[in-house]
Amino acid sequence: MDIEAYFERIGYTDSRRKLDLETLTDILQHQIQAIPFENLNIHCGDAMEFGLETIFDQLVRKKRGGWCLQVNYLLYWVLTTMGFETTMLGGYVYNPPTEKYSSRMIHVLLQVTIDSKNYVVDAGFGCSYQMWQPLELIAGKDQPQIPCIFCLREEEGIWYLDQIRREQYIPSQEFLNSDLLENKKYRKIYSFTLEPRTSKDFESVNTFLQTSPMSLFTNKSFCSLQTPEGVHCLVGFTLTSRKFNYKDNMDLIEFKTLNEEEIEEVLKNLFSISLEKKLVPKHGNHFFTI
């Protein structure tokens, strides 16, 4: 694996590459605007592989995306290769319909330490929940970013990531009641501890998430990519485009229903993805908001 190939993939050309917060932020932002958060392999009849070499081949050489287990594993390799003090952590994702966090540790995130300060770094949550900058690991402090205000809480050694969202403007009346819309201003995202993890801790859940009929990822096909102004998200046949803060404290969300031919074009033009196999778009009943 060649880290220079990774830098070329994400369009990162800064040669200074100091082990500081500015560099860390720059790499995170380049990755989330170049590498989509997606699970399309499942809906093309392929596996979501978890070996680092295979992940590098898919995300860098084949210019595809991946889900959190893949994109954050790749980012972990990049940061440790550069010399950042990086720790892999495990998260439990919040499910609003049940008002509970997942019983399984299904999310990978990273902790990076710079000058004795700890930061949460995550390139793999996608949609409008994706952080654009590392979050300082400090409880009870609002941390405003372009997508929203993020905040961390801590209770008895368990950390919680939440967000405060803007109002949403949806011009298309037919989509005002879409099940893809997030309607809560205050949104819980996931919980985690600071216990160091390794890739082995996620091997079984990587299999579960792509094979179980109970998994969100087998029930919905999705692809999201951050842009300089917002985020594009394709779920099943529905394409959404969000512009952050297009008016004071309000996001603009536009919807479009695609046919199969349009999906192929959108994947190429908006997400820079060319699939090797036929995609079977799916929009099941599992809760998923953009």
Image (spheres, rainbow, N blue to C red):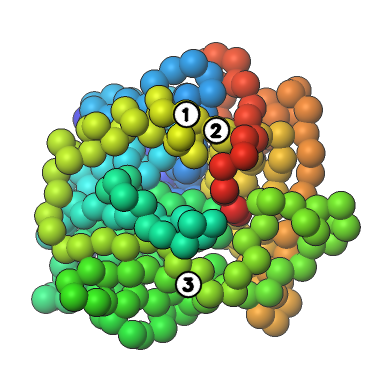
**Quadrant in which the N terminus is drawn:** top left
Q: Which residue is mark 2?
A: 219
How far, Cα to Cα, is label 2 from label 3? 25 Å
Left or right: 219 in relation to 87:
right
Residue 138 vs 79, above or below: the answer is below
Q: Nearer the viewer, residue 63 or 207?
A: 207
Left or right: 163 in relation to 246:
left
Contact check, label 1 and label 2, Cβ < 8 Å: yes
**Amino acid type of the residue tagged 2 in the rendering:** Asn
How far, Cα to Cα, is label 3 from label 1? 29 Å
Q: N-terminal of the two: label 2 or label 3?
A: 3
The kind of secondary structure element at disc 1 is: loop
Residue 193 horizontal/vertical position (percent): 20, 63
Residue at the image point whose x is 41% and y is 83% from the top: 142
Q: Nearer the viewer, residue 168 or 83?
A: 168
Residue at the image point whose x is 26% and y is 76% from the top: 154
Q: Which residue is mark 1?
A: 213
**Amino acid type of the residue tagged 3 in the rendering:** Gln
Residue at the image point whose x is 67% and y is 57% from the top: 181
Q: Quadrant of residue 137?
A: bottom left
Q: In front: mark 1 or mark 2?
A: 1
Residue 102 horizontal/vertical position (percent): 36, 52
The kind of secondary structure element at disc 3 is: strand
